[in-house]
Image: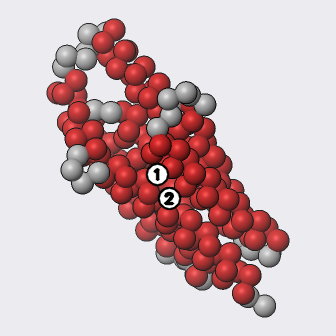
Amino acid sequence: MTGNISFLSLAAAALYALVALGAMAACGTAASSGQPNWNRNVWLALAILFVVLIVMRGFGIEDLVRDAIRDAMRGDGSYAERRQMQGIVMSIALAIAAAAGFWWLRRITRNLRGRRNVATVAAMAAGGGMVFLVLLRMISLHMIDRALYGALKLNWIGDIGTSLIVLGAAIYYVRLVRARP
């Protein structure tokens, strides 16, 4: 881990560890209780995602990627004109993410039955939101940074919120499945 890790990064890593443990518990519960394989696979993927997030926080990988993107833009001379590209890149990214999210949510909820499956899908959607947030932080465009780190601290709200949704869904899933006869 880096020597200059902040208290907030340590707190985020601790929250990610708690979420990863919750997802692992849900994965184990799904496997031992004969739940559908996709439930187990989703919980396993979420546990892996949050372990990767711990590693990324610990080694400052987001910062390294962000700096590499800036250096590449400076190297090819496009850094000075980045604000013109930012609006276009941001609009395209948000449109694609919104369309993909809407399509996926509509497709998966058509035949969704049972509270355990709803909890799994909610956790999966929150995990997707976390991935999108991490990508936005790595892109680090001026307009994005202003929204993420401005007065509302949308970065914190998104990061903590998606983590807590996954953790809550995992706890709910474990309790629900274990309570079944």
**What colour scheme governs how the chains and residues are painted in the rendered image of this protein?**
secondary structure
Q: Quadrant of residue 1?
A: top right
Q: Disc 1 vs disc 2: Cβ atoms closer than 8 Å?
A: yes
Q: Disc 1 vs disc 2: which is toward the camera?
A: 2
In terms of secondary structure, where does tag 2 sit?
helix
The answer to whether residue 180 shows anywhere in this view is: yes
Tell me the residue that label 2 is attached to. 163
35 with respect to 168 (left or right): right
Name which residue lies at 25% across and 17% down.
79
156 with respect to 53 (left or right): left
Q: Amino acid at mark 2?
A: Ser
Compared with 159, 146 (above or below) is above
The one of 27 and 149 positioned closer to us in this rendering: 149
Q: Quadrant of residue 3?
A: top right
The answer to whether residue 121 shows anywhere in this view is: no
The one of 113 and 69 positioned closer to us in this rendering: 69
Name which residue lies at 74% across and 70% down.
30
Badge 2: few (under 14), some or many (20 or more) residues near its Cα, within 10 Å?
A: many
Q: Amino acid at mark 1?
A: Met
Name which residue lies at 50% across and 49% down.
12
Name which residue lies at 54% across and 70% down.
168
The one of 19 and 143 positioned closer to us in this rendering: 19
Tell me the residue that label 1 is attached to. 130
| Residue 169 horizontal/vertical position (percent) | 56, 71
Q: CA distance from mark 1 to mark 2?
A: 8 Å
